Image (spheres, helix red, strand yellow):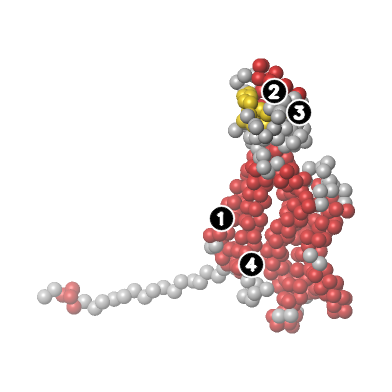
Amino acid sequence: MDKKLFKIASKKQPLAQLTQIKSSAKRYWQRVFANKWMIVAIVILVLLFVLLIVSKLFYSQSFNQSINDAYSINYELPSSLAPLKSITLPEGEELNVFTVLKQKYPNYIEISKINNQNYDSNSYWVLFNAYGILNDNSLHLLGTNSSGIDIYARVIKVLFDSFIICFFSILFALLFSMIFAPISAIYLQKDLSKSIEKWISIFALLPYLLFALIINLTMKFSILNFIISYSILSSLFMYINAYQISGEILKNEYINVDKSLGFSKWNIFTKDLIKPVFFSQLIFAIEQISLMLISYSALAIFNIDNTNISLGLILNESLQLFDKNPSYLLTIFVYISATIYALKTISYSLSSAYTNIRGQNV
């Protein structure tokens, strides 16, 4: 019999593995990016941003000058990718203009008489390619508005300005609230803190959109003024949020433990407050960007400033041209809606994944 069959079996003892300790920040970001919708939202934002930058750099049309001086035919044109435009004209000077143009450009104009028994006067159906008549070989992606100005150039201008306004406003508000709100919650005396809480409760009841509209309608239109107004407004609301978060954290028992161990107020600020307040403010900042875009768009309702190009102005234009060129409004709607959807999704993902460094929800 084989002696190997009677050999005592041996089993290697498993070696204990060291536990890898992950920081709360690393665990937080792992939870955030484990959400597939978060990845989708980031991809959407990146694509929109890249499209905006590429268009800004390479789309050469003017946002405030007509494509040429032929005002009789360059207004309310469709996209140059589908350049044919049809209109119905009665007998008169405008029809005579197209009749003359047809003799010069027979390949770009068709004129047909409409048999209309309801009217005594004759009407004519005119189909023409204005870009061919004007010998304009440039790309006009969305056509022109009622002044003959390239629509897509105006959309790019406004969306890029909106990005600049939101970015600098929210950056200032985030830094201001993240630093000064926790410091004021720690260092100010209790009586002063109570008075601040009273003012906070008053301002918290006022809607952001109402505040934004009042401020923007009273200021002269400029990008700098919009940045200043939104920076002040967002700083106020984000300060309120950061102050309330700081107050809730300071009520926790571990803060008293840190104080008993000899931690100074500055140590508590840097060790216990700055990180949870930052993550909370990051979520709130994304909500503020959405409110900025909504309030900036809402200025179109008042229709006060028609001289400076803004989101409200091009929204008004797109609504007026919707029956003739729906792509104008649809482009704005898709871009703004996709941006807000992506921001809301990111905000929700950040909020769902957020826990305090101590393991408590804040």
Q: Which mark is residue 351?
A: 4
Mark 2 vs mark 1: give the one in front: 2
Q: Residues within 10 Å of mark 3 (few under 14, many from 20)?
A: few
Q: Secondary structure at mark 4?
A: helix
Which amino acid, mark 1?
Answer: Val
Which amino acid, mark 2?
Answer: Phe
Residue at the (70%, 57%) spot, across then down: 290
The vertical placement of 149 against 193, above or below, is above
Q: Secondary structure at mark 1?
A: helix
Tell me, yes or no, if residue 152 can be seen here.
yes
Circle 2 sits on which residue? 98
Disc nearer the start of the sequence (4/2): 2
Q: Secondary structure at mark 3?
A: loop
Nearer to us in this view, 157 or 25: 157
Disc nearer the start of the sequence (4/1): 1
- The span from disc 3 to disc 2 (Cα, nearest Å) is 13 Å
Q: Which mark is residue 40?
A: 1
Tag 2 and tag 1, C-beta contact below 8 Å:
no
